[in-house]
Image (cartoon, grey):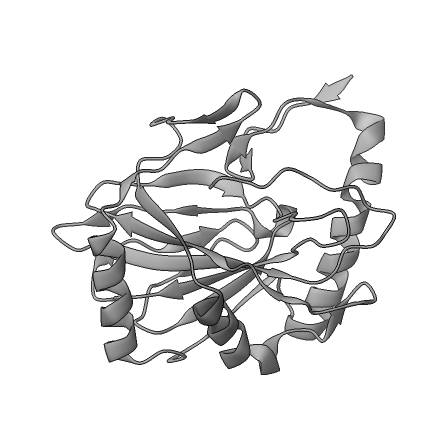
Amino acid sequence: GTVRRHEARGDRPLAPVKKYNILFLMWPYMKVLVELLEAHGRAFWTIPSVFTRDECRALRERIDGLAPTLAPVSLPSGPAVREDIRTNERVVFDDPALAGELVSRVASTLPRALVGRPLAGGNPRLRGYVYRPGQIFRAHYDGSYRPTASLGSELTLLLYLNEGMVGGATRFFDGDVDVVPETGKILLFAHPRRGRHEVRAPNRRDVRRVSRQNVAPPLSPKRSARALPTG
């Protein structure tokens, strides 16, 4: 028998998986979730006012200057535009200094280690997202960043760059919680199933912009590497 999953993982829809494989595949992620639940009570948490309004404005201008385009989702055949799943715009840029600053400012809230592996830092490849009125990203959960066989991420970091819009919340299905954008607020959440979420459309003329990176502790040598997600 098979179990069908309809959400996206690593920004792509999941194929059916064998029932007897589920616990084996999910066990490493379940251990991460247990530790996060013990530390925070949830697989996601927020920290307000991490970046100033001026810093966020500068990032918004930087993202706009890079000319965001329609964001793809990752499919087995490769990245593809799927407007039935995702309609927001995106830019990708490398900035190791900014990645380090993002992690540094929330370091006190991060676990020092997950499943025995110490924190290694953040992915220097950042993504800037723009959600214009009516744009969405349907239910999915993020894939891990796997630059090498010995390094991989377990958490996603989102920095909200503006506020005051109608709609535009990040909805987590674990408890049906909406995280409302506030300028300078950071949201952290686990990649695995408890981190399943969607981004709801802003209304009127408001625009929601975020910058994302993956927070990466070293991978256990027994865990296999995975392809870099393109979301």
> How far from the left and from the top, in percent, is residue 8?
53, 34
Q: Please indicate whether residue 19 sits to the left or right of residue 6 in the image.
A: right
Quarter of the rendering containing residue 186: bottom left
Q: Residue at x 64, y 72 (%)?
A: 40
> How far from the left and from the top, in percent, is residue 122?
57, 64
> How far from the left and from the top, in percent, is residue 218?
74, 60
Q: Residue at x 72, y 76 (%)?
A: 112
Q: Residue at x 26, y 66 (%)?
A: 162
Outermost residue to the left: 205
Give the total number of marks visible in the rendering.
0
In depth, the one of 161 and 196 nearer the eye is 161
Q: Quadrant of the N terminus?
A: top right
Quarter of the rendering containing residue 20: top right
Q: Residue at x 29, y 57 (%)?
A: 209
Q: Please indicate whether residue 20 sits to the left or right of residue 144 in the image.
A: right
49 versus 119 height, above or below: below
191 versus 17 height, above or below: below
> How far from the left and from the top, in percent, is residue 138?
42, 38
Outermost residue to the top: 1
Q: Please indicate whether residue 186 sits to the left or right of residue 67 in the image.
A: right
